[in-house]
Amino acid sequence: TFPTHQAPSVAPLTFHKGTFCQGDSTKLRDFIPSNTFDLAYTGFIDPLLDPLNLLGDSATIRQTELLTQHLCLQQSLSSELHEQLIQEMHRRQEAWFAKWVAELIRIVKPGKYIIIEDVGWPACSENAEDWGGVDPSWWNMGVEQFGWDVYVDSIDIVQEAWYDDRYNVRMQKKHDQPLADPEAAAQERLRKNEASRNLYEELKVKFWKDRDDDWDEEYEEDDEEYDEEDDDWDEEEDGWGDEEEESYGENTLEVDV
């Protein structure tokens, strides 16, 4: 939520609490001030479909997909040129991801968390299933490379994302002032992390638990209705059997052989 004194500077007066305000995610500075949110979260960072710009703006998604597959195939054939192209593609993809991450860190309050879900793996890697992303090891290196204002030891990689070929990331922004005892501060962050190590899994488990409860109730009602129908059918079947047996007995003749 927006602090009352900051709300006008965050969005136009025509916007109301609970609505989404549109903007360029790589240029949040234009409409969202720094240190605004208690949590900065994104469900997915869209990768660059054609990071080398080999096809141009008119390319279709299918064409970019085929291009990526071609580059990966040529790399596997030990083509030096294609190996260089893949490395440059990774570098540009990482720079693109870094823009998103830098803005997410900027808009969150000191000491608060940033969560990024469903991060894709680099193109042509064993786990990649789409146009690419960044390797889990990239996040720790990014703190030094891009100067992110986060605690390195707070970076938490969750491999079990919604999709098998994705992973989730959580990190904590540094406090305004260094804490007196860095070791105690690290222990405190560890304690908080252990209390809620995997926010995504907790949310997912709760979601499916609620769904399972609803489904259990629905199935119990169906079972009760089915049992009632089954009892009616048994009574009807029993009655039919008695009448049929009597009728059958009246129309039979015992014959000794």
Image (cartoon, rainbow, N blue to C red):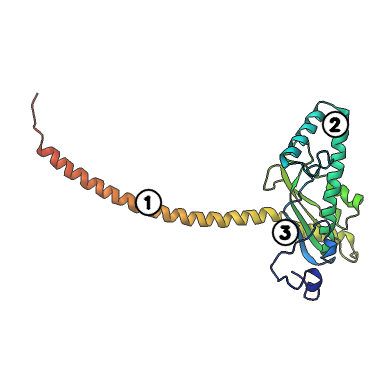
* Neighbour tally class for label 1: few under 14, some 14-19, many 20 plus, Cα within 10 Å: few
Q: Which residue is mark 1?
A: 226
Residue ID for mark 2: 82
Q: Residue at x 82, y 49 (%)?
A: 97
Residue type, numbered disc 1: Tyr
Nearest-to-viewer mark from 3 and 2: 2
Quadrant location, the N terminus: bottom right
Image location (x, y in percent) of residue 191? 77, 59
Residue 253 higher or lower than 28, as above or below: above
- The residue under label 2 is which amino acid type? His
Answer few, some or many: residues within 10 Å of disc 3's Cα (few below 14, many 20 plus, some between 14 and 19): few
Label 3, label 1: how far apart the Cα atoms are: 44 Å
Q: Which residue is mark 3?
A: 195
Sequence-first tag of 3 and 1 = 3
* Front residue of 153 and 134: 134
- Which residue appears at 13% of the width and 41% of the height? 247
